[in-house]
């Protein structure tokens, strides 16, 4: 993972792009609620992953500058949710 300050110093062409799967995960997060049933089942059906592995990948994406550049609103919202949940767990 590239630190944010190094990322911003890179030319746009030098920045690593998101993989297709990473782009699919971001797209899924914007529309998962449209799937009938539980999100965990939709994750299994869409990605053939356990929900644990999916959330590990998603958590990594939240720290990826390319993901923030790809969808700043979604990634910002998910980062805020993650921070709020972490604060709640620390109490």
Image (spheres, helix red, strand yellow):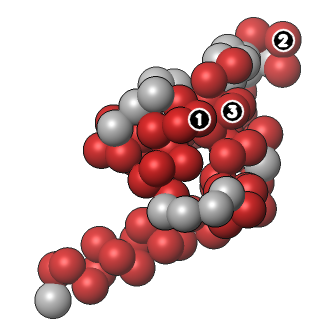
Measured from the top left, where is residue 56 in percent x and y?
35, 40
Measured from the top left, where is residue 22 in percent x and y?
61, 29
Q: Nearer the viewer, residue 50 or 68?
A: 50
Measured from the top left, where is residue 28 in percent x and y?
67, 46
**Against 73, is 29 above or below?**
above
Q: Nearer the viewer, residue 21 or 44?
A: 44
Point out which mark residue 35 bears: none
Indicate which label's residue lies in the foreground, 2 or 3: 3
Measured from the top left, where is residue 7 in percent x and y?
64, 29
Query: Residue drawn at (73%, 62%), measured in percent from left and top?
Result: 34
Mark 2 residue element: helix
Q: Please name the residue that numbered disc 1 is placed on.
A: 46
Q: CA distance from mark 2 to mark 3?
A: 22 Å
Q: Is residue 76 visible?
A: no
Q: CA distance from mark 1 to mark 2?
A: 31 Å
The 10 Å Cα crowd at callout 1, few under 14, some 14 to 19, many 20 or more, is: few
Q: Is residue 13 left or right of residue 5?
A: right
Point out which mark residue 13 bears: 2
Mark 3 residue element: helix
Q: Please name the residue that numbered disc 3 is placed on.
A: 24
Query: Residue drawn at (34%, 76%), measured in percent from left and top?
Result: 85
Q: Is residue 86 visible?
A: yes
Dots 3, 1 in contact, CB < 8 A: yes
Query: Residue drawn at (74%, 43%), measured in percent from left and top?
Result: 27
């Amino acid at each position: 993972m590239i630190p944010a300050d190094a990322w911003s110093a890179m030319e746009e062409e030098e920045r690593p792009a998101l993989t297709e799967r990473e782009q699919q995960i971001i797209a899924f997060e914007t529309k998962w609620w449209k799937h009938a049933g539980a999100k965990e089942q939709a994750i299994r059906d869409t990605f053939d992953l356990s929900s644990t592995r999916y959330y590990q990948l998603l958590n990594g994406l939240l720290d990826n500058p390319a993901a923030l550049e790809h969808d700043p609103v979604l990634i910002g919202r998910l980062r805020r949710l993650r921070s709020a949940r972490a604060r709640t767990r620390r109490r």
